[in-house]
């Protein structure tokens, strides 16, 4: 405004506009202000883009972040992109049983082929270890050794970069071509009289050093520790009298041995006498002959793999993701971790990611060596949306306020039922990447990471508030 016009406005009593009007904050500035609510120390990365690739928000878009379970998006996308017959029974992946050696008392060999869903549950209806036990019991009433054979994949039970303290838990249980009951052991802890040790209900695979007590006040806090390779569990802490039993899911270090151990109990329950030992058979990593496939006595046909891919992403199942990575590696390699990662890397190159966008060490996200840039993840999500399998892959994502790991998030907000994304949480890390439907009805693609979250702080509320703001403004 000129000096003359300003003088005229003042003479007429008209309020003058400011000489330097402040521009309205941009959407990115408003998002950045929202993220500051998480407090100091948190390192955020965010890219939000339209389906045609126009970026609406870009915060540290090319920095590399620990993705946690967002890593499962790479593994499951590669499965959709490279595996066939995902909607048919998994006839090649099922476990088999055969007899070896002396006809009077042969050895029993249970061989795994990468199936993640083999079950020994009493109410098992499909993919049941009991069906293999029935086949043996119908052939012989006396056997020698029970051998769990997982040599279909190399013996790489944990990926590089997984924290050793996760090994005793179900989150870090070992991966094996012969997997049973998610390679977990359920320990149920029930309160007794005050001051007394609680009652334990667990299959006798591990010895339990029970140092826990039943208390009358406070909150139930139980801890389980076990050194890698040890068969002794140390239970500590307290359970409150009168409360519901606590159910702890424990990891297993040698899944092939555990499967053979369970198979022995199933055979004995069917009247088969076992005169030998329970042992496991592995194939060392590195070059060498792949596992043979002798004629089996019986073979299981698990349900379609697409169901397992849905479970993997919906509930963020670490073991199933690791087994899927090894299955990818078995297509043209040995089934080693590196072979699976080579398949994933080839897919990412096809999708247009730069090699500097990522580094991967596993299929689940438990490795602290994994890295991804937000722009790189959005590039994958955009590319996948154009593929024939893109819709089926997206259907495996948790839905906000509806199911999976997002069942309790975004409830009662504008994004309930309108955000489809993979979560991630590990070692001071939170992640959320996928698709959302904005207020206008258009689809936005996003990748959101928080790393270096200080102990006691929380980044998730600020991340959710930022996504709600973005959806409202588009």
Image (cartoon, helix red, strand yellow):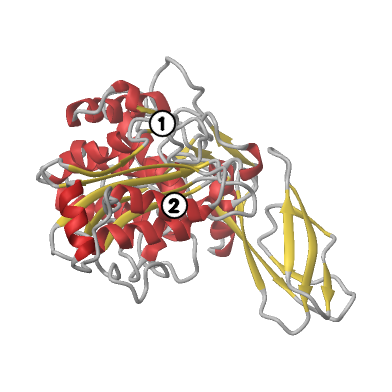
Q: Mark 1 highlights which residue?
A: 64
Q: Mark 2 highlights which residue?
A: 35
Extreme top residue here? 287
Q: Nearer the viewer, residue 187 or 146?
A: 187
Extreme front residue here? 11
Q: Position of residue 113 (x, y in %)?
A: 37, 40
Q: Position of residue 244 (x, y in %)?
A: 66, 80
Q: Is residue 204 above or below residue 244?
A: above
Q: Nearer the viewer, residue 151 or 294?
A: 151
- Which is more N-terminal, label 1 or label 2? 2
**Circle 2 — which element?**
helix
Residue under the image location 50 percent in, 30 percent down: 369
Q: Position of residue 348 (x, y in %)?
A: 25, 30
Residue under the image location 19 percent in, 38 percent down: 81
Q: Nearer the viewer, mark 2 or mark 1?
A: 2
Q: Is residue 108 above or below residue 201?
A: above
Mark 1 is surrounded, within 10 Å at the Cα level, by few (under 14), some (14 to 19) or many (20 or more) other residues, namely many
96 vs 304, left or right, is right
Q: Nearer the viewer, residue 353 or 309?
A: 353
318 vs 248, left or right, is left
Q: Is residue 406 above or below residue 195?
A: above
Quadrant for the C terminus in the image: bottom left
Q: Is residue 307 above or below residue 228?
A: below
Q: Nearer the viewer, residue 224 or 289?
A: 224
Q: Position of residue 71 (x, y in %)?
A: 38, 40
| Alpha carbons under labels 2 and 1: distance apart | 18 Å
98 vs 162, left or right, is left
Can residue 112 be seen at all in this image of the molecule?
no
Question: Residue 144, which numbered label?
Answer: none
**Circle 1 — which element?**
loop
Mark 2 is surrounded, within 10 Å at the Cα level, by few (under 14), some (14 to 19) or many (20 or more) other residues, namely many
Mark 2 touches mark 1? (CB < 8 Å) = no
């Amino acid at each position: 405004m000129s000096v003359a016009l300003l003088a005229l406005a003042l003479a007429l009593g008209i309020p003058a506009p400011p000489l330097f009007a402040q521009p309205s904050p941009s959407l990115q500035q408003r998002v950045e202000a929202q993220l500051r609510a998480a407090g100091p120390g948190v390192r955020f990365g965010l890219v939000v883009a339209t389906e045609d690739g126009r970026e609406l928000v870009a915060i540290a878009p090319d920095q590399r972040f620990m993705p946690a379970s967002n890593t499962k998006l790479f593994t499951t996308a590669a499965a959709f992109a490279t595996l066939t017959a995902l909607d048919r029974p998994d006839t090649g992946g099922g476990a088999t049983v055969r007899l070896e050696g002396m006809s009077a008392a042969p050895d029993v060999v249970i061989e795994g082929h990468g199936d993640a869903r083999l079950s020994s549950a009493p109410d098992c209806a499909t993919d049941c270890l009991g069906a293999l036990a029935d086949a043996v019991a119908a052939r012989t009433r006396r056997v020698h050794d029970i051998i769990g054979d997982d040599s279909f994949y190399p013996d790489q039970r944990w990926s590089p970069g997984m924290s050793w303290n996760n090994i005793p838990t179900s989150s870090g249980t070992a991966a094996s071509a012969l997997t049973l009951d998610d390679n977990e052991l359920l320990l149920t802890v029930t309160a007794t009289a005050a001051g007394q040790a609680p009652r334990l209900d667990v299959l006798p695979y591990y010895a339990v050093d029970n140092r826990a007590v039943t208390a009358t006040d406070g909150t139930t806090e139980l801890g389980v520790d076990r050194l890698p390779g040890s068969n002794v569990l140390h239970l500590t802490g307290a359970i409150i009298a009168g409360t519901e039993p606590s159910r702890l899911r424990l990891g297993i270090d040698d899944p092939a041995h555990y499967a053979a151990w369970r198979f022995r109990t199933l055979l004995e329950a069917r009247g088969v006498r076992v005169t030998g030992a329970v042992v496991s058979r592995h194939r060392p990593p590195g070059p060498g002959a792949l596992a043979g496939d002798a004629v089996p006595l019986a073979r299981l046909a698990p349900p379609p793999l697409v169901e397992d891919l849905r479970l993997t992403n919906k509930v963020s199942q670490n073991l199933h993701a690791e087994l899927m990575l090894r299955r990818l590696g078995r297509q043209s390699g040995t089934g080693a971790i590196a072979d699976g990662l080579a398949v994933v890397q080839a897919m990412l190159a096809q999708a247009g990611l730069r090699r500097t966008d990522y580094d991967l060490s596993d299929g689940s996200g438990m490795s602290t060596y994994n890295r991804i840039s937000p722009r790189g993840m959005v590039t994958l999500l955009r590319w996948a949306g154009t593929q024939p399998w893109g819709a089926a892959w997206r259907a495996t994502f948790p839905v906000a306020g509806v199911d999976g790991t997002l069942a309790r998030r975004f409830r009662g907000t504008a994004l309930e039922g309108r955000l489809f994304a993979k979560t991630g949480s590990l070692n001071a890390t939170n992640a959320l990447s996928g698709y959302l439907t904005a207020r206008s009805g258009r689809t936005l693609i996003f990748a959101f990471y928080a790393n270096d979250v200080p102990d006691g702080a929380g980044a998730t509320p600020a991340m959710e508030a930022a996504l709600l703001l973005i959806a409202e403004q588009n």
